[in-house]
Image: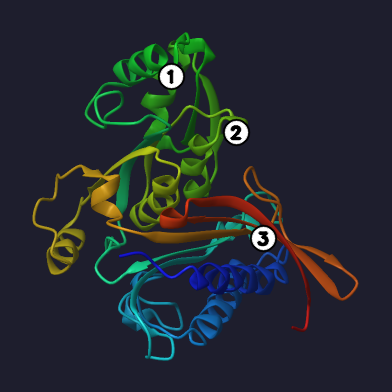
Amino acid sequence: MSLDKKFEDLFLNVSIKAALSSYHFVGKKDKIAADKSAVDAMRNKLNEIEMRGKVVIGEGELDEAPMLYIGETLGTMSGPELDIAVDPLEGTNFAANNQPGALSVIAVAEKSNLFSAPETYMNKISANVPSEGIIDLDYSVKKNISNLADYKNKQPNELSACILDRPRHKKIIEELRNLKVNLKLISDGDVSGALLVSDKKYNIDIFMGIGGGPEGVLAASALDAFDCFFQGRFIFDNENDVNRAKKMGIDDLNKKYLLNEIITGDSIFCATGITNGDIVSGIKIEENKYISETLITHKSTNLKKIIKSKNEINE
């Protein structure tokens, strides 16, 4: 089954409105207000859509409302049953400090087709390669780079890797430097980091390292439309995480998930820029109008493009 094409415009509008709402808090040094504004706008627009939507990836548990919490139901409660993954403001620090890379992100699939990821870390790897065997979470950094270089007919020093700049990645970063791989270190925002492998124009050959599990699922939705390789393994390093995983039906705590196990079937993904970033530009205000840019993908219709919209602010 595939999602109706009409949902492309509907969910595009959701991410645009969330981005615009959050934009008003850019540079105000209040990441909580910026996030809440995006959440409220996203919820309001989702509740207008004819669907029986359920949040499978949100901003926390029920007791953390007013976030879009895991298990929250949205929509008019008529129409198809849909799974929804949201990150109303990816890069809260970017928005608060008026730095590049803040996004409003949403992914949607039919019921049970979107992996319900726990709020825990995930070790992930992605590249624009067709299948297993070229890169793998269980390979050494050297083997992944060597295999990727062979596949792309390049030398390691011609490859570029994107990785979150975190102390936990010190060893990986050192190994990549020793291999003379070009590095793009990002301070936050690993949905967009993973998406940089989707197109040659971004000049990123591989994304690797540990980031948020929910962000991994969101990125996988878009990477699926680009036929990229993605692999993730959740990290459960305390009893709470283990118990939560088991409640969500995750029995094998060491399992490596391939893209088609995270996103089964069709999905729509939208990421609207709040501040300028590598993939999309941020919101711009011109008199009573605002301009937005959104990366939208829809696997079944082969839609994968950046849409620039100009709308009245008070629409």
The residue singled out by tag 1 in the image is 176
Amino acid type, callout 1: Leu
- 77 lies left or right of 162: left
Amino acid type, callout 2: Tyr
Nearer-N-terminus badge (3/2):
2
Residue displayed at 30% across by 62% down? 114
- Image height of 91 relative to 157, above or below: below
Nearer-N-terminus badge (1/2):
1
Horizontal and vertical percent position of residue 4: 43, 70
Label 3 and label 1: CA atoms lie apart by 31 Å
Nearer-N-terminus badge (3/1):
1
Q: Nearer the viewer, residue 33 or 156?
A: 156
- 34 lies left or right of 64: right
The residue mark sitting in front, 3 or 1, is 3
Q: Nearer the viewer, residue 56 or 171?
A: 56
Horizontal and vertical percent position of residue 245: 17, 62
- Say few, some or many: other residues with alpha carbon within 10 Å of mark 1 (under 14 / 14 to 19 / 20 or more): many
The residue mark sitting in front, 3 or 2, is 2
Residue displayed at 26% across by 32% down? 137
The residue singled out by tag 3 in the image is 274
- Say few, some or many: other residues with alpha carbon within 10 Å of mark 3 (under 14 / 14 to 19 / 20 or more): many
Disc 3 on helix, strand or loop? loop
Label 1 and label 2: CA atoms lie apart by 19 Å
Residue 32 visible from this viewpoint: no
Label 3 close to label 2 by CB (< 8 Å): no
State the mark number for residue 87: none
Residue displayed at 54% across by 77% down? 42
The residue singled out by tag 2 in the image is 202
The residue mark sitting in front, 1 or 2, is 2
